[in-house]
Each structure stands twice: as C-alpha cells, then as structure tokens.
Image (tube, rainbow, N blue to C red):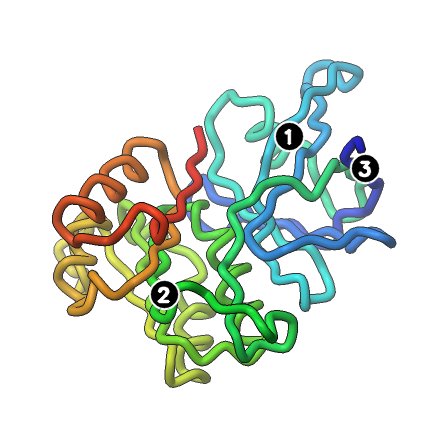
Amino acid sequence: MPTPTFSTRCTGHRKIAHDVYEFTLAKPEGFSFQAGQFVMFQVPLVDKVSDVQGRAFSIASAPSEPELLFVAKIKQGGRAGRWISEMLKEGDEVKLQGPLGKFTLAPYPNAVSGAGFEPAGEQKLLFLATCSGIAPLRSQLVEALYQGDTRAMDLLFCVRSEENLFWAKELSEIAKGHANVHVHISLSRPSAGWKGLTGHLQDVASQVIPDLPERSIYVCGGPEMVKAVRIKAEQEWKIPKERIHSEDYV
C-alpha cells in the first residue's frame, strides 16, 4: 500500500540558532504517526519551483501535540536549506508524504497505549543527539511522558558552540517537570565563557551516565557520530546490539 501524500499549511517559521530553523505545520486531517518517524517533503527548487524533489525530515513534535514541529540545520546551497531559509513562510502550502520509518520507542508496559507489552530490558533510556538529530528524540521523550512513562530517561544534546544551541530552555523545562528525566547539554567547541559540559557526545555520556550498561540507547545525528556511538556502546559500555537504536542523516 503506497504511503499517502497530504497537503497542509505552514503555521510558523523562525530562525532559532546559527543556520537552524524551526517551522510548524497544521496537522493534516487523517495524518497519524508514531514518535520517531519522519516525512518526505515535496521540496521545490528556489530558482525553478516546478522542479520538485523529496527530502526527509524527522517529526519533532509528539503525536499528542496539536501541530507538526520540525527543525532544520541549513546546508548552504542545498535544495531543502534554500527552501526553508529563503522561500518557506507562514501560510504557505506544504505537501508531505508519510509517515515513514521505524525509529520508534519500545513500548512501556504501564503506558496508556502500551499496556500489556514488555519492553524486553528497555527499562532505562538514554537519548543521544547532535543538532537537528534532536527532532525524533524530542518526539519520543514528550510522547513517552504524555503516556505516563516513568522509566529513567536521560537526554544528552550536543552542538558545536553557543551560537548553534537551541531548545535548551524547553528541554530543561521538560526535565524540571518530571523527576525521571534529566537533560545534559554539551558543546564540542565552546567559548571560554561556557560553564557547562564540554566534549563530544559519546565522551560526555561516559562522564555523566554512571549506569550505561543498563541503558537502551536512541541516537540520532550525523553518520560518523552515530557510528562512533554504536561502536563505543557495544565495545566499552557493553550494551547489547538489540538495545542500540539509531538513525542518521546526511
């Protein structure tokens, strides 16, 4: 059965960090998805709008939220980057295909929608993200909490520098409201005035998460980072392959 295509409207659009934009869309009638899935946007070429190609974006909002939220790190000169930074605006029609993907959270036995399921050892969760890789993890985290999930959850979010950082306040507010959630922000190339965590994602995780072998990992970011985390998780943290879930982007 082919994946359906929907038409909707952009309800919000703003730049939130250096080369990072977030935008929201009205949720199309009949569109439903699982936290962690993505859609394919039909993206026009800025210089020739009749030239349309598909581009994949993870959904950052949770299924329980009223709108669809997306975040994009702009690749200079790229088709999707130019569309988002130069062309897309509130009120525009947007066409998308989806939902797609299987990067979804193992169900929690006491959750509203997961009753009767056993998560097979996935009792403690660790979310690892760089830049726009935070999108599907935010969706998973927010939806899990909405469903009443009380598993221990740590989110480690790493970007290059202060000018690249976004959603730090929102993520911290989520953690403040839930005793089972902890958020850790790290910069790989901070300024001299940065007072927080410093270093690459996999190295910081080793420093701040004392029970890594007990965790199930959900990691999203660039291919090299995801590969490095998977290797470290298996070889150093001794986490079984079946508890390492990943998605990368180009």
Q: Amino acid at mark 3?
A: Pro
Q: Nearer the viewer, residue 218 or 197?
A: 218
SS for callout 2: loop
Kindly report which numbered mark, 2 or 1, lies closer to the viewer in this rendering: 2
For image coordinates 49% across by 68% down, the residue present is: 118
Q: Is residue 248 left or right of residue 200?
A: right
The quarter of the picture where the N terminus appears is top right
Q: Does label 1 or label 3 sit earlier along the sequence? A: 3
Question: Residue 2: x percent and y percent?
Answer: 79, 31
Q: Amino acid at mark 1?
A: Trp
Q: Is residue 205 left or right of residue 62?
A: left
Q: Amino acid at mark 2?
A: Gly
Q: Does label 3 or label 2 sit earlier along the sequence? A: 3
> Which residue matches tag 2?
121
Q: Nearer the viewer, residue 178 or 196?
A: 178
Question: Residue 175: x percent and y percent?
Answer: 40, 77
> CB under 8 Å between callouts 1 and 3?
no
For image coordinates 17% across by 56% down, the residue present is: 204
Kindly report which numbered mark, 1 or 3, lies closer to the viewer in this rendering: 3
Question: Residue 25: x percent and y percent?
Answer: 73, 51
Dot label at residue 4: 3
For image coordinates 50% across by 77% down, the residue present is: 149
The quarter of the picture where the C terminus appears is top left
Task: Name the image quarter holding residue 97.
Answer: top right
> Which residue matches tag 1?
83
CA neighbours of label 1 inside 10 A, class few (<14), some (14 to 19), many (20+): some
Question: Residue 124: x percent and y percent?
Answer: 34, 69
Report how far apart the C-alphas of labels 1 and 3 lie in the structure: 22 Å
Q: Is residue 192 left or right of residue 150?
A: left
